[in-house]
Amino acid sequence: MKSPVHRCRDVEHGRGQGMAGANCLQAEQRIPISKDVITSSSASAMWFIRDICGIVCAVITWLLLLYAEFVVLFVMLLPSKNLMYSIVNGTLFNILAFLALASHLRAMCTDPGAVPKGNATKEYIESLQLKPGQVVYKCPKCCSIKPDRAHHCSVCKRCIRKMDHHCPWVNNCVGENNQKYFVLFTMYIALISFHALLMVVFHFLYCFEDDWTKCSSFSPPATVILLILLCFEGLLFLIFTSVMFGTQVHSICTDETGIEQLKKEERRWAKKTKWMNMRAVFGHPFSLLWFSPFSTPDHGKAETYQYVV
């Protein structure tokens, strides 16, 4: 009788290495695997994707935030005669900006849920103790055993657990481990954009009622140009991040990633309530830590994944 390893189908037919295949026609069983087994060793280390396009987009994000900070402080708030107005709005704007940048850093530098590279070896498959008739999938691109709901990212060059999409603005995939930070990033950018738009409107009204030379430390033409650019930036980011925030929350509530929705993949995992899905991403129980980019959610140490077989 053949050993369990010999029953595993190879993804590249004809190589005969005893590894799992991606062309299995039927999914008769699934093998529960502990999360610790398929967690990348880099999960606790620094994670950074060396992609030129992603790095440029991330730098542009920071520069746009710095521009908004400059206009809000030096064009609108510091020249204002109302000290309380400047203190309240300056404090609120800077808190939101700090949380947005912190969320961006956490989303960019957190392992999104990468499956260890090259673990589809004969020895490792033997250690799974497969039963007769069981097979496992192997990713031919990163040579890793692919758990259920994992997809390969061509930019990260890894299989990512519960991959939603690759976002160049955070230079990283949005996956199981960093989806919370990405949602917080979109939320805080939307809030800061809305706040900036409100201040631009009030400042325009104030300058129209008063002398333009007194409502800003810059010349009237320069003030108008700076405010119009900030208004355009705020409106663009408000629309974009609001849509992204809404799609992410919907994806979390339905427990279906963007890739799974796009591919219309058959649901093979247990259905949970919307509240349970939210708790799975942001951590539980509900608290203010849900809104903190410095709090790492507990996705469950005893969580297991299914290898499609």
Image: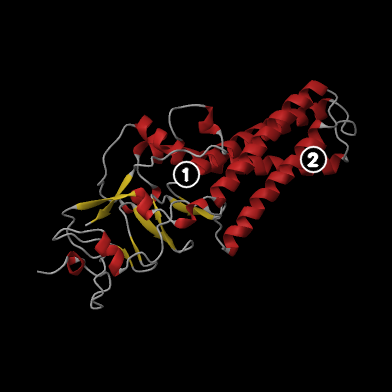
| Residue 224: mark | 2
Task: Give coordinates of residue 290: x percent, y percent.
Answer: 50, 32
278, above or below 209, in the image: below
Q: Nearer the viewer, residue 153 or 7?
A: 7
Q: Position of residue 39 (x, y in %)?
A: 40, 53
- Relative vertical location of residue 12 with respect to residue 145 in this rendering, above or below: below
Q: Earlier in the sequence, mark 1 or mark 2?
A: 1
Residue beneath the point at 78% across and 44% down: 225
Q: Nearer the viewer, residue 152 or 41?
A: 41
Q: Secondary structure at mark 2?
A: helix
| Element class at badge 1 | helix
Q: Residues within 10 Å of mark 2 (few under 14, many from 20)?
A: some
Q: How many numbered marks appear?
A: 2
Q: Which residue is mark 1?
A: 179
Front-lying residue, 215 or 267: 267
Cα distance, mark 1 to mark 2? 38 Å
- Which amino acid type is shown beneath numbered disc 1? Gln
The quarter of the picture where residue 190 lies is: top right
- Along the horizontal axis of the image, is 26 left or right of 63? left
| Residue 48 vertical placement versus 9 (above, below) | above
Whether residue 229 is visible to the viewer of this picture, yes or no, is: no
In the drawing, does residue 111 fall left or right of residue 235? left
Quadrant for residue 71, please give it: top right
Q: How is the image coloured?
A: secondary structure
Residue at the extreme right of the image, as rendered: 213
Q: Amino acid type of disc 2?
A: Val
Q: Quadrant of the N terminus?
A: bottom left
